[in-house]
Amino acid sequence: MSGNGKDFEPRIVGFLCNWCTYSAADTAGVSRMKQPPNVDVIRVMCTGRVDPTFVLKAFVEGADGVIVSGCHPPGDCHYNNGNFKTFRRMPLVEALLAQYGVDEGRFHWGWISGAEAPKWAKLVHDFTEQVRELGPLDWKQQLESKEE
Amino acid sequence: MATLTIDGVQVTAEEGQTILDVALENGIEIPTLCSHPLLEPYGACRLCVVEIIRRGWPRIETACTYPAWDGIEVNTKAPQVMEARKVILEMMLSRTPNVPIIQDLAREYGITEPPFPAEAPDEKCILCGLCVRTCHELVKADVLNYSAQGIERRVGPPFLEKTRQCIGCGACSIMCPTGAIEIVLEQEAVYQEKPLGPTSAVWVPSLQAIPRVPVIDKDSCIHFRQQDRSEGKIDDACMACQMLCEVDAINFEQEDEIIELDVGAIIVATGFEMWDATKLSQYSYGQSPNILTGLEFERLSNSAGITGGEIVTAEGKEPERVAIIHCVGSRDHNAHEYCSRFCCMYSLKQAHLVRDKTDASVYEFYMDMRAFGSGYEEFYERVQKEEGITMVRGRGASVEVLSNGKLRVKGDDADLGELVHVDVDMVLLSTAVEAPHDSSEVASMFGLSRKPDGFFAEAHPKLRPVETNTDGVFLAGSIQGPKDVPDTVGHAGAAASMALALLDKGEVVISPQVAIVDEKLCSACKTCISLCPYTAIAFVDEDNVARINEALCKGCGTCVAACPAGAITAQHFTTEQIMAQIEGLFRVPAEVEEGVKA
Ligand SMILES: Cc1cc2nc3c(=O)[nH]c(=O)nc-3n(C[C@H](O)[C@H](O)[C@H](O)COP(=O)(O)OP(=O)(O)OC[C@H]3O[C@@H](n4cnc5c(N)ncnc54)[C@H](O)[C@@H]3O)c2cc1C
Ligand code: SF4
Ligand code: SF4
Ligand code: FES
């Protein structure tokens, strides 16, 4: 899988809340919007459910990039304010990743409503290209080689 | 109660009634010019004179001021009465020889020519004082009064000059029996500023209004305008409607109020709004009063509207040619990309209305015709064939206001393959509709999502067309996308039955995706308690643990992610399940790996 430059196909994990970004991604798919196949989506009921360890786990398992996306603050979250918790947690995740030396361009968190399917498709496209530019993260291999 | 006879008929009267009141109540006609049920009697025109015989003594009196006393005898047509009225009318006709109502009355009493030459043949005022009393008693503006004496006597504002005291309500002019008062407004009248709005100060917005009751337009109502102008000091102006309403239904004190209800289901049916047609300047909307949107035309052709349903231009003339332009702001990359769906059919209906009510020729510019409903295609055929509407296939490109006021409509005729134009008197723009401007507030109030076109999203486009992602909240009508009346009614019926089914069950089914606390692991830190948006987590002191009420929990998982002891599990979204999903993404099954290697 891994490689450099144009051959490299990044693996990206997206944690999307059921009500907003997941439904945007669904609409993007149903409407046959063009988007690269590099993002694998994991559905959670709310971004408030996204435990920082999920993000780390994805990187550990081999992701080159991670997206966390939910409903627009203030009022769009299906659970009133789960997104506020995300709003407070994600900067901590960013800080943590920086300490691990993960380029900030590999982690994206934000808001896409159910009505914003084109925005999702664009994010998938832009983020994939951004991570492709950064090349493989290879955390997993590095970790494994250290363990040896 | 009093008993008296009028023209030999025995009648009864209430305390405080005049002879005129009683006569009118009993269908006995007495001519009058200066009396009005809302105003104090004044006896100025003296036309209502009758003969009254009291205690054997006959005398001539004005019926509008004479109390209906017990035992009196009244003759409204005695020869001396008729003679007296004739003299009065002779004087009046000599003063105002050219006023039709006076001419008619005079003729009834056998007068054909004024006996005396008129001093000012254009005079219309008979000095009855209805206007003065209206302005004083009803409007409470006290602008009008009498001035001078004898033949110099006049009515008017102080020094007969323009005064800011006048509120321009026009009540005096409406009351004046001879049409002597003309209102010259320096600003446009309130009604004209609201072309689709009220047609008078008390109005029923449409004949189909539910409930079909009149409302008061505070901007034109004399009562409220006087209250506003005087900062509350004049709080009893006019109220004519209240005095006349027999069932006492008018309440000036009524205020907007906020009513709080606890309900089990909500149907959101906020519909659509008209797109602002000034956004595409090529259609010149707003530059001529004869360029109307579809909705404005609906009002114009409505029998409850400003013209009573007559289709006329702003100049008050019947149009000779009318153009209708479809898809203005719809199916357009510079405005809305979607089709507004019902405008094709209402445009055809409007073409039909123009043909039905006027002799105008109709030119309809359309890209293609979306006659989707039952009987719609047949209607389309009919208006073309039987009503002779000229259909131009191609987008209406622009409307230009010519110097003579005519409107030049240009378009591309795809059938002829050339540009065409037509000069018309009225243009109807079938403007797009869009989600109401406050839709994002409404959406977040109910936790609803919207589609890329701005309308509200149903839970599933095919299988759950009226439900939303919020339990107990349903959509009905055009809020979900443009719908005509039959579709709206069908959709709304479905929403109502979904809501009723929910209420009827008496219980709600909740999702099993709830969180549970593993009490063995709970460290009693209480982190989760304040995080839950539904206050579903309570701290149980006796057991020293947090416990989740499953009926309240919505399963968002916020507490799960926050619990430092890892004591909370979101059922169906457990940490193990999510971790396994992440792992699964990167574990290539052995046989696939084999296959790749082979
Ligand atoms: C010019 C024109 C002509 C038409 N002619 C026809 C025709 O001949 N035949 C036909 O079948 N259809 C016709 N239609 C379509 C018809 O108007 C719609 O089908 C119908 O109005 C849809 O009803 P609705 O209840 O969904 O929305 P609406 O009629 O838009 O009603 C929504 C209501 O919600 C209110 N509202 C909005 N926001 C809020 C809020 N936040 N709080 C409280 N209340 C709110 C609005 O004031 C409005 O009263 C025509 C439409 C237009 C524009
Ligand atoms: S219904 Fe007809 S006029 Fe309206 S946008 Fe669609 S195609 Fe155009
Ligand atoms: S999952 Fe969400 S709703 Fe349920 S108890 Fe936890 S915070 Fe409250
Ligand atoms: S439900 Fe989407 S962020 Fe909470």
Image (cartoon, rainbow, N blue to C red):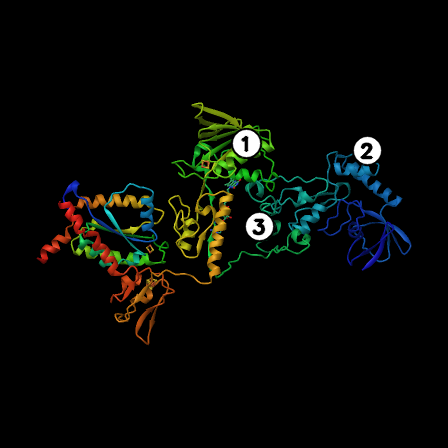
Rendered position, A134 above or below B248: above
The residue at the point 81 percent across, 40 percent down is: B89
Q: CA distance from mark 1 to mark 2?
A: 59 Å
Mark 1 or 3 closer to N-term? 3
Tell which circle, 1 or 2, labels the residue nearer the N-terminal end.
Answer: 2
Closer-to-camera residue (B181/B147):
B181
Query: Circles 1 and 3: CB distance less than 8 Å?
Result: no
Q: Is residue B333 left or right of residue B142?
A: left
Label 2 vs 3, first from the N-terminus: 2
- Give the foreground label among 2 and 3: 3
Q: Nearer the viewer, residue B118 or B297?
A: B297
Asked if residue B242 lies left or right of residue B29, the reply is left
> What x and y, as percent, mark residue B210?
57, 50
Instruction: Name the element at disc 3.
Output: loop
Q: Which residue is mark 2?
A: B113
- Callouts 2 and 3 in the same chain: yes
Quarter assignment of residue B447: bottom left
Amino acid under label 2? Glu
Q: Residues within 10 Å of mark 3 (few under 14, many from 20)?
A: few
Residue drawn at point x = 75 percent, y = 48 percent: B35
**What's under tag 3, amino acid-wise?**
Ile
For residue B210, the mark is: 3
Residue B175 has which mark? none
Disc 3: host chain: B
Image mark 2: chain: B
Can residue B475 be spotted in the picture? yes
Label 1 crowd (10 A; few <14 / some 14-19 / many >=20): some
Q: CA distance from mark 1 to mark 3?
A: 33 Å
Asked if residue B102 lies left or right of residue B250, the reply is right
* The one of B103 and B146 positioned closer to us in this rendering: B103
- Indicate which disc residue B382 carries: 1
